[in-house]
Amino acid sequence: MPNKGVSQLIFTNNGQGLDMDKTKDKIFGFNQKFNDSPDSKGIGLYLVYKHITSLGGKISVNSPPNEWTEFVISFKE
């Protein structure tokens, strides 16, 4: 549930999910890859994080392993 005075964008997918115990400190790091897909470059989440935080926002992740991933981007209004 969003906080009063905060706008949120919530993105959810039904992909592989992430083991947050293993990735929590690395998830927004440069050149971090969490699967063997040839399309994975390891810079997308890093760039999103840098842009969001440079604008004063926050991004959080919820992801049960092997289920889905949810990203919540929050900005103060």
Image: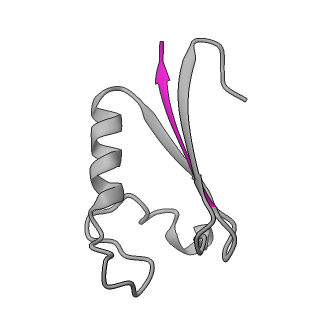
Report x, y in % for residue 47: 27, 51
Residue, far right: 1
Prevalent SS, magenta region: strand
Is residue 77 placed above or below 25 in the rendered structure? above
* Residue at screen point 46% across, 24% down: 75
Colour setting: one colour
Residues shaded magenta: 69-77
Q: How many marks?
A: 0
Classify residue 67 as left or right of residue 13. Answer: right
**Picture coordinates of residue 48, whole percent (x, y):** 33, 47
Residue 21 figure quarter = bottom right
Q: Quadrant of residue 1?
A: top right
Left or right: where 65 falls relative to 39: right
- Residue 43 is situated, as x and y percent measured from the top left of the image, at 26, 63
Q: Is residue 56 magenta?
A: no
Q: Residue, x 26% and y 70% (percent of image)?
A: 31
| Residue at 31%, 56% in the rendered image | 46
Q: Is residue 2 above or below residue 15?
A: above
Q: Position of residue 26 (x, y in %)?
A: 41, 66
Q: Is residue 51 above or below residue 66?
A: above
Q: As drawn, is 59 to the left or to the right of 51? A: right
Any magenta on residue 72? Answer: yes
